Amino acid sequence: MTSQAMEGACAFAWRNYLLLHSGVSENDDRRSALYRYVTNLRDTGQSDFDLLQIAAVAYLKNLDELHDDRAARFAADRVLAECLGSRSAQPDTRL
């Protein structure tokens, strides 16, 4: 499942990115960078589809704003950490 979650999160983020940036090629280098980033998250144990989607979108947004892969990874990691913190602070309402 983790591979499917990773692939789905990357596809979701990339499709949305292309919708917002009509001049970007399907094979742009940012797509490869996105897959490397999300693969790294998966390799560190993150397999939650929703969180991978959030991180993937945050990574692409920050990559555009900061023009630096390392800074974009750091910024997206902060967003992911905030989401994880928010989730752990909420009571579990599942039955």
Image (cartoon, grey):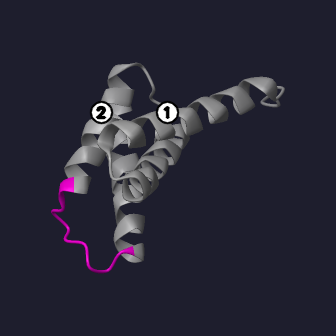
Of callouts 2 and 1, which one flags the residue occurring earlier in the amino acid sequence? 2
Residue located beneath label 1 in the image: 77
Residue at image location 25% in from the left, 72% down from the top: 24
Residue 15 coordinates in the image, percent (x, y): 36, 66
Q: Residue 28: say if magenta.
A: yes
Residue 24 visible somewhere in the drawing: yes
Of residues 46 and 94, the one nearer the viewer is 46
Q: How many marks?
A: 2
Magenta residue span: 21-29
Q: In which quarter of the image is residue 23?
A: bottom left
Q: Main secondary structure of the magenta part?
A: loop
Is the N terminus in the top left, top right, bottom left or bottom right quadrant?
Answer: top left
Q: Can residue 1 be seen in this view?
A: no
Residue 84 place in picture, x, y as percent: 64, 29
Q: In this view, does 30 lie above or below 24?
A: above
- How far separated are the C-alphas under marks 2 and 1? 13 Å
Asked if residue 11 lies in the magenta stretch, the reply is no
Residue type marked 1? Asp
Please tell me whether mark 1 sits on a helix, a strand or a loop: helix
Pointers 2 and 1 in contact (C-beta within 8 Å): no
Q: Is residue 33 left or right of residue 82?
A: left
The residue where tag 2 is placed is 39
Q: Is residue 18 left or right of residue 16?
A: left
Towards the viewer: 33 or 35: 33
The local crowd at label 1, few if under 14, some if 14 to 19, many if 20 or more residues have their Cα within 10 Å, is: some
Amino acid on which the number 2 mark rests in the picture:
Thr
